Amino acid sequence: MKSAAATALSELEREIDAPGGGLDRLRLMPTPFVPEVRLHLAEDAIVWWARMEAAAGHALAPPYWASAWAGGQALARHLLDNPELVAGRRVLDLAAGSGLVAIAAALAGAAQVVANDIDPYAVAAVTINARANGVAVDATGRDLLDSGGDAEVEVVLAGDAFYSRALADRMLPFLQRAAAGGAEVLVGDPDRGHLPADRLTVLADYPVPTTEPSVDSSLRWVQVLRPG
């Protein structure tokens, strides 16, 4: 029996190869603000999600991986503009979604990149998108947040990974443990209100054009931060 990630990979590969167009299709395109990286994104993620749920006959996780999110866009831009942050180092990208940040780290010269997301469709999307960009990224679906972290990881990245209070309450302690263990930790966040400002240092901020569904503005100000 195929694993959930393998099944999702087969489904996404069929989606990409299917003829035709429309709002419910995936399309390989340069990422806004990070055109060096191409991603398979939905023309309309909500419409795509509705069609896939109807075909599956049951609920599916929201396809966060099918949109470019502002926190990830800013963090990916920061890595490509400052490749010394990851060059030659072992990198972990948490809540990887489409794999944008992981792919940017690989393009910036990281020695090894692991992209982690618990959604099997995101794991599949990372695999497909890494392939489209000609880089090696190891995608995994294990839930890592209650672990002590990997002592061999030198850089931990989290782009737009604080979109809910529940996730923030698990993500931040993991990042703090990683930083205490000696890893460089970098966060990209568009001020969703779940980060304690007094426990992070702002490294840069960017005006990011976003393709996120259901937002009031096409531009978001995003900060890149580190704990401490």
Image: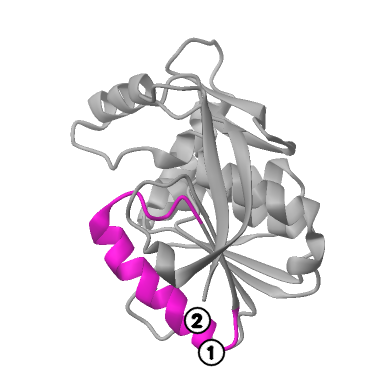
Q: Quadrant of residue 154?
A: bottom right
Q: Which mark is residue 101?
A: none
Could you tell me which residue is drawn at 78 percent across and 58 percent down? 82
Residue 23 spot, x, y in % from top left: 45, 13
In the picture of the structure, the residue carrying the numbered disc 1 is 181
In the picture of the structure, the residue carrying the numbered disc 2 is 178
Helix, strand or loop at label 1? It is loop
Q: Is residue 62 above or below residue 118?
A: above
Left or right of 60 on screen, residue 148: right
Left or right of 12 on screen, residue 78: right
The reply to whether the magenta stretch includes residue 169 is yes
Q: Quadrant of residue 110?
A: bottom right
Could you tell me which residue is drawn at 50 percent across and 48 percent down? 124
Could you tell me which residue is drawn at 49 percent across and 19 percent down? 43
Residue 50 spot, x, y in % from top left: 28, 23
Position of the N terminus by quadrant: bottom left
Q: Residue type at mark 2: give it.
A: Ala
In the image shown, does 46 or 52 lie closer to the viewer? 46
Q: Is residue 83 above or below residue 47?
A: below
The reply to whether the magenta stretch includes residue 52 is no
Disc 1 packing (10 Å; few <14; some 14–19; many ≥20) = some
Q: Which residues are magenta?
A: 159-183
Residue 31 spot, x, y in % from top left: 65, 33
Query: Can I make out residue 5 in this image?
Result: yes
Dominant secondary structure of the residues highlighted in magenta in the image: helix
In the image shown, does 126 or 213 lie closer to the viewer? 213
Query: Can I make out residue 98 in this image?
Result: no
Q: Quadrant of residue 61?
A: top left
In the image shown, does 224 or 173 lie closer to the viewer? 224
For the view shown, which residue lies furthest in the front direction? Answer: 198
Q: Is residue 4 above or below residue 111?
A: above
- Asked if disc 2 and disc 1 are in contact, CB closer than 8 Å, the reply is yes
